[in-house]
Image (cartoon, rainbow, N blue to C red):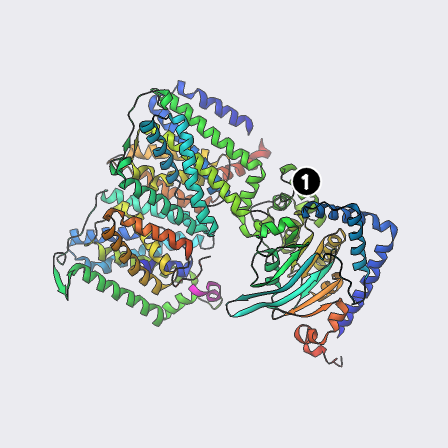
């Protein structure tokens, strides 16, 4: 499998040379959402704590770095770390409340949704950050302000983010941390009886996940240049984050990437095909159907299924 | 609205994330009936309930049935998928703008004692109460109703004594959907609705059901009253756009301190 | 009647065998080595560096405990487990009522009693899954009430569950590895330990299989292996023999015995009387949350109240057949 990954990597690195700007944009979204999905994968895929409010972390990271850049002149390269830390702080709160109070499954989902919605409503009603009109960043094209003229720069940054997150997940999976998270997902009580401090490891997963997601928020802010509370804190973004690992394979290293490569083109295609109105929600129907199909037929996601097929084909090779 | 959700959970232990979106469809159906067929929603709600009943049964048979025993995450994701489909199908079918249904009763108001009451809301309230009562009678007096309660209490036991559990589940889901369809219709003259509103309706339902206690019908009823009062107070004391904040904060508090709600049974 | 006699005979035969084992020089060496390993591990965990003469003194005490056959007790300086006056109520039911007992190092204590007597509740209380309403529990000289289950496991008290809970999607090896990681944070090290334990319990050939596909007997072994991989001092086994056929039971009995001989103390909940009588150095009988009797298997089996409450009223008056 290694040489396939290496070859793919080389292809991805060389791709911008041959693609037009639109295609590059598509890839940027593939990489970026794969990055967010990978961050979510740590707490949602491996630890099995379904968070449907990860958009909250994107939003906090985005607003934090945007505000710091515009109001305080702090370069987003540092701002992204601040955003990450603030997101991790919220993640700590949510995680603490959820895990300390023993909220599992549906209740935890609801808690995360509630927090994301609270953030959204607060942002909508706070004029200091633009309120309902949103917050805008003026384009300067200055790399030190994390802004680039050339789309391709964003491409490589997004690719870098995706690879970084994947490396983190791979490192986690190789270590005791990963083994414990997987076991926690399987059966928490059994873990406790085996000496696993489930609270601590779930918290750790949440903190790492929310930090990375917060860092992603900075990319979001400085790629789109406008922050709308409904978009950046909203459920649709949380859905975008969650659906890629789920379809691709939650709890696997390559799942979110595979999921993103399946879903982003799908979204683009349906948006082009159906594209009337400012609300191109039609691709979400496809998402919904795909989600249903995955749950019913491929509950572990596409990547494990592919791996099984690959293994079965082995004797023939 | 909440009663339907709690019924589905009580009988099948499945959380219906698509609840709010079903309600939106109820609203749109009522709207369709009103605008195309000239049927007043206060009459048409029966049709809405019927259509949604069928939709509920179909969804249950085709989809939910397969994952009744699956781990919770799978159920959640499935219903989320259904919610996505419903919400965006509505978007495609009806467009994103808010709608409202015109009802001849809309404009009328009457005095009840010292309070100035909107007739439309009064009728909605009365009908909702009547439906709740009807449901209660159904569950306690009829055979099918009792069977459903038995299955809710102990699915395995019900299976052992020969209950067609799948049919019970289908009916339960159907009724739950019907409730919400009726609710949608009844509320359509009062509240503006749009496809994107499905989520907040789902959340509102969850709020109520969790406060009242998952699986408990009187809980859902009381929870409904409690939440609406709290929200209205929130709208009065804070700004109207913040009233959602009240319900979310309430939700968080309840989740933390008393997930079983006022009357609920445990949810595992 | 016959059952009791059988149990007695079995126990006497067993005692003879074990004593023979213990006194025979050649058989002793591997046992001793493993026992010593257990002792050194215990030292590591209890945090205090014990001086060699203390260790030797303690070993002598443990051996003395084991050879003791009379009911008269000489309490050694620190018992492995001291349970004192614990109680637990659930709503209207007093599940455990003012229960006290203790365990010596290296001992197998059988916990028997009718269903609903509170035995599994005792396990929950000991392992930290439930807090007692009253009473204290000292494990290895340390109070453990209020500690979370994972902390108690780290101190050396491991348990299995009555209804086995394997990690269904993981392989047997990965299952046991989770247990091994408790003492061996390095994945490779834990994996090696897991392999060793899997071989020890006889699941070697199934190491790569998914846990969900095992038979009940295999799953019980897996549960046992997983707990064993945490390298406990005291192992709580909750009805490991339930649902097994006689051959499987024989196998598990000798497995448990070998684990005990390697130095692990065992607290055993079991309904299978023959197995309990065979394995246990002592037995405690619970009924309605209270201790009915405690002592050597033979004396417990003859105890009239125990017979009345658990073994059966008809045994009080020997029947004519």
Residue sitting at x 38%, y 30%: A218
Q: Secondary structure at mark 1?
A: helix
Which span is picked out in magenta?
B151-159
Q: Could you say which is closer to the camera, residue B72 or residue A95?
A: A95
Query: Looking at the image, which residue sits at the far right?
Result: C25
Residue B13 falls inside the magenta stretch:
no
Pointer 1 residue:
C192
Chain designation of label 1: C
Q: Residue A105 placed where, x, y %?
A: 45, 50
Q: Residue C152 placed where, x, y %?
A: 61, 52
Q: Could you say which is closer to the camera, residue A72 or residue C9?
A: A72
Residue sitting at x 24%, y 60%: B46
Badge 1: few (under 14), some or many (20 or more) residues near its Cα, within 10 Å? some
Overall secondary structure of the magenta section: helix
In the image: residue A281, left or right of residue A311: left
Q: Could you say which is closer to the camera, residue C131 or residue A5?
A: C131
């Amino acid at each position: 499998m290694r040489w396939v990954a290496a070859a793919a990597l080389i292809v991805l690195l060389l791709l911008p040379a041959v693609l037009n700007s639109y295609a590059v944009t598509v890839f940027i979204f593939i990489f970026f959402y794969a990055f967010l999905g990978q961050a979510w994968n740590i707490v949602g895929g491996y630890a099995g704590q379904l968070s449907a409010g990860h958009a909250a972390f994107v939003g906090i990271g985005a607003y934090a770095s945007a505000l710091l850049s515009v109001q305080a002149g702090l370069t987003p390269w540092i701002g992204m770390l601040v955003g990450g830390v603030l997101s991790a702080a919220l993640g700590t709160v949510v995680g603490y409340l959820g895990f300390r109070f023993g909220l599992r499954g549906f209740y935890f989902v609801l808690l995360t949704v509630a927090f994301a919605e609270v953030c959204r409503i607060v942002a909508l009603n706070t004029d200091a950050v633009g309120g309902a009109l949103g917050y805008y960043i003026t384009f300067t094209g200055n790399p030190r302000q994390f802004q680039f003229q050339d789309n391709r720069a964003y491409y490589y940054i997004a690719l870098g983010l995706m690879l970084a997150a994947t490396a983190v997940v791979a490192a986690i999976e190789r270590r005791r941390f990963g083994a414990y998270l997987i076991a926690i997902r399987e059966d928490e009580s059994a873990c406790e009886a085996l000496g696993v401090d489930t609270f601590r490891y779930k918290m750790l997963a949440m903190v790492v996940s929310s930090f990375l997601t917060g860092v992603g928020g900075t990319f979001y802010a400085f790629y789109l240049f406008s922050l709308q509370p409904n978009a950046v804190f909203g459920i649709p973004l949380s859905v975008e984050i969650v659906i890629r690992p789920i379809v691709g394979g939650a709890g696997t290293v390559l799942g979110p990437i595979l999921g993103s490569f399946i879903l982003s083109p799908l979204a683009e295609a349906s948006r082009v095909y159906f594209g009337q109105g400012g609300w191109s929600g039609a691709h979400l129907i496809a998402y919904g159907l795909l989600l249903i199909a995955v749950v019913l037929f491929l509950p572990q996601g596409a990547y494990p299924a592919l791996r099984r097929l690959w293994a079965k084909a082995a004797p023939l090779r | 609205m909440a009663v339907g959700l709690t019924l589905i959970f009580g009988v099948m232990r499945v959380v219906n994330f698509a609840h709010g979106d079903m309600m939106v469809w109820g609203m749109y159906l009522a709207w369709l009936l009103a605008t195309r067929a000239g049927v007043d929603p206060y009459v048409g709600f029966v049709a809405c309930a019927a259509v949604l009943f069928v939709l509920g049964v179909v969804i249950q048979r085709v989809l939910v049935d397969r994952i009744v025993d699956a781990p919770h995450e799978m159920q959640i994701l499935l219903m989320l998928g259904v919610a996505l489909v419903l919400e965006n199908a509505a978007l495609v079918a009806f467009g994103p703008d808010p709608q409202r249904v015109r009802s001849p009763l809309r404009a009328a108001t009457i005095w009840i004692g010292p309070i100035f009451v909107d007739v439309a809301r009064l009728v909605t309230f009365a009908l909702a109460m009547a439906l709740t009562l009807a449901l209660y009678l159904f569950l306690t007096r009829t055979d099918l109703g009792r069977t459903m309660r038995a299955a809710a209490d102990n699915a395995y036991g019900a299976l052992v004594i020969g209950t067609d559990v799948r049919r019970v589940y289908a009916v339960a889901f159907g009724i739950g959907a019907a409730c919400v369809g009726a609710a949608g219709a009844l509320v359509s003259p009062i509240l503006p609705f749009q496809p994107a509103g499905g989520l907040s309706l789902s959340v509102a339902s969850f709020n109520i059901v969790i406060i009242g206690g998952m699986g408990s019908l009187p809980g859902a009823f009381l929870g409904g009253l409690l939440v609406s009062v709290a929200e209205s107070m929130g709208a009065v004391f804070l700004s109207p756009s913040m009233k959602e904040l009240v319900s979310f904060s309430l939700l968080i508090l309840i989740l933390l301190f008393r997930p079983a709600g006022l009357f609920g049974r445990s949810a595992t | 009647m016959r059952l009791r006699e059988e149990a007695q005979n079995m126990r006497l035969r067993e005692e003879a065998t074990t004593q023979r084992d213990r006194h025979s020089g050649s058989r002793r060496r591997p046992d001793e080595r493993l026992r010593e390993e257990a002792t050194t591990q215990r030292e590591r965990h209890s945090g205090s560096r014990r001086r060699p003469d203390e260790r030797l003194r303690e070993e002598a005490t443990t051996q003395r405990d084991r050879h003791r056959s009379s009911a008269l007790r000489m309490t050694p300086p620190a018992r492995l487990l001291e349970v004192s006056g614990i109680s637990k109520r659930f709503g209207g039911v007093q599940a455990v009522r003012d229960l006290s007992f203790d365990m010596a190092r290296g001992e197998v204590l059988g916990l028997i009693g009718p269903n609903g007597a509170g035995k599994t509740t005792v396990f929950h209380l000991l392992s930290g899954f439930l807090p007692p309403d009253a009473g204290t529990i000292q494990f290895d000289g340390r109070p453990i009430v209020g500690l979370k289950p994972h902390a108690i496991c780290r101190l050396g008290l491991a348990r299995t569950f009555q209804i086995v809970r394997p990690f269904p999607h993981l392989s047997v090896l990965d299952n046991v590895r989770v247990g091994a990681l408790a003492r061996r944070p390095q994945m490779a090290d834990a994996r090696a330990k897991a392999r060793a334990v899997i071989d020890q319990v006889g699941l070697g050939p199934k190491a790569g299989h998914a846990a969900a596909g095992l038979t009940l007997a295999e799953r019980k072994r897996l549960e046992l292996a997983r707990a064993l991989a945490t390298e406990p001092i005291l192992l709580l086994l909750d009805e490991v023999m339930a649902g097994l056929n006689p051959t499987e039971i024989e196998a598990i009995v000798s497995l448990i015995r070998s684990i005990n001989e390697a130095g692990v103390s065992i607290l055993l909940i079991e309904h299978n009387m023959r197995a309990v009588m065979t394995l246990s150095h002592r037995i405690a009988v619970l009924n309605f949350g209270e201790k009915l009797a405690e002592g050597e298997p033979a004396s417990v089996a003859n105890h009239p109240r125990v017979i009345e409450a658990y073994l059966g009223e008809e045994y009080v008056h020997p029947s004519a057949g």
